[in-house]
Amino acid sequence: MASGELGRQPSFHDTRDLTPFRSAQVYAPVRGMGRRLAQRMAVRVRAPRLRPFASKVEKQVHAAVFVHGEPERLVLLARAHPGWSGLCYVMAGMHAYRSHHHAQAAELLARGIASASDRAATAFATEYLGGIRHWIEVSEGVEVETVFSEEAVCLALAHSLREIGRPEEAVSVLAPLPPSLPAALAACRLAEVLGRPLEIVARTEGLTNASDLAAALLVLRARALRELGRRDDAQAAVREALRRRRTSFAVKNAAATERALLMLGMGRRGRGGASGARGRAAASPSSAFEELREAGKARRALDARARERWLRDFEDLDREADD
């Protein structure tokens, strides 16, 4: 990727006074810690009361969003009322995303973004949908809570596209978003999937561990630097990820894993001669563990030979004593 393109991409610096992001949670992907919240993407205390003399379509959309929660009802409303199609398709996609139906969510959200909404639908969203909270996964084991907004919809669409194996389209969805840590983390995760470590390094230049999202982003930076063979820079990123005492335990575990991989010498670029051969052999985890396995076998074989020599010497002593 050209440096000019990297310079035009959004970074993690968010200068806005108000953002749609509220909180974040980090869980261990293996054990699924914190998935209770993830199962409830939308958090609603109660359905807001409709205004007096609301129109029939408002009543139908209100019931479909807050009472039934079924994407099919919203899709039927989108077909019956073209002026409300954009809002209905988006909410249907968010309901599908809540149920982890990513293929359906990607289709509905993309259709909702491309569709138009009239003034009545926009006013409805402003008045009634602002209290909905959405838990959106931006990276493996990292979720952010957002209010209903364009950024929440785009992040959910990008995650669904990543889950169904369309990361290139997910990158284009995130491109128009303003700079923020969640958007940067989602973009770096996509860059990792696409095998673009240089893009991750460029996006995270100058990042410090000010939050769990920043720490998770630093772990991705360390991983990219290790892949590029920049071992010292990767160690610096790991140290920064572990610096803050209140960093999430799951992020600290991931950073400690990166530190262990660096200590094993993985990810080093090959150098000339025999050292280059060793560097190339250590470039993949499987080759590194194979070297450890071979070393263990050699040590056990040496111990077996020493035991055999001891047994022979002991038998010779027995024969001499008998003679």
Image (spheres, rainbow, N blue to C red):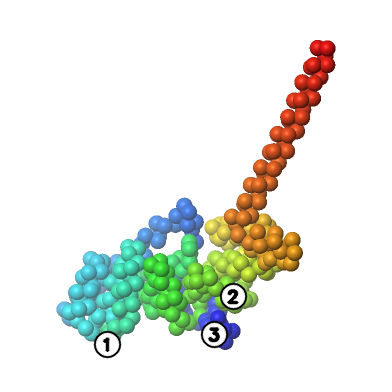
Instruction: Name the amino acid, label 2.
Output: Leu
Q: Nearer the viewer, residue 258 or 209?
A: 258
Residue 198: assigned label: 2
Q: Is residue 247 left or right of residue 110?
A: right
Instruction: Name the amino acid, label 3.
Output: Glu
Quadrant of the rendered structure where residue 197 is? bottom right
Q: Is residue 202 left or right of residue 183?
A: right
The quadrant of the rendering that contains the N terminus is: bottom right
Q: Nearer the viewer, residue 92 or 189?
A: 189
**Residue 106, image x, y percentages:** 34, 72
**Residue 232, image x, y percentages:** 70, 67
Q: Secondary structure at mark 2?
A: helix
Instruction: Name the amino acid, label 1.
Output: Arg
Q: Secondary structure at mark 3?
A: helix
Residue 260: assigned label: none
**Nearest to N terminus: mark 2 or mark 1:** 1
Residue 119: assigned label: 1
Which residue is rendered at x = 56% and y = 57% of the image?
Answer: 249
**Nearest to N terminus: mark 1 or mark 3:** 3
Q: Is residue 184 left or right of residue 147?
A: right
Q: Is residue 264 above or below residue 240?
A: above
Q: Residues within 10 Å of mark 1 (few under 14, many from 20)?
A: few
Which residue is rendered at x = 79% and y = 17% of the image?
Answer: 318
From the image, tell me which residue sits under label 3: 5
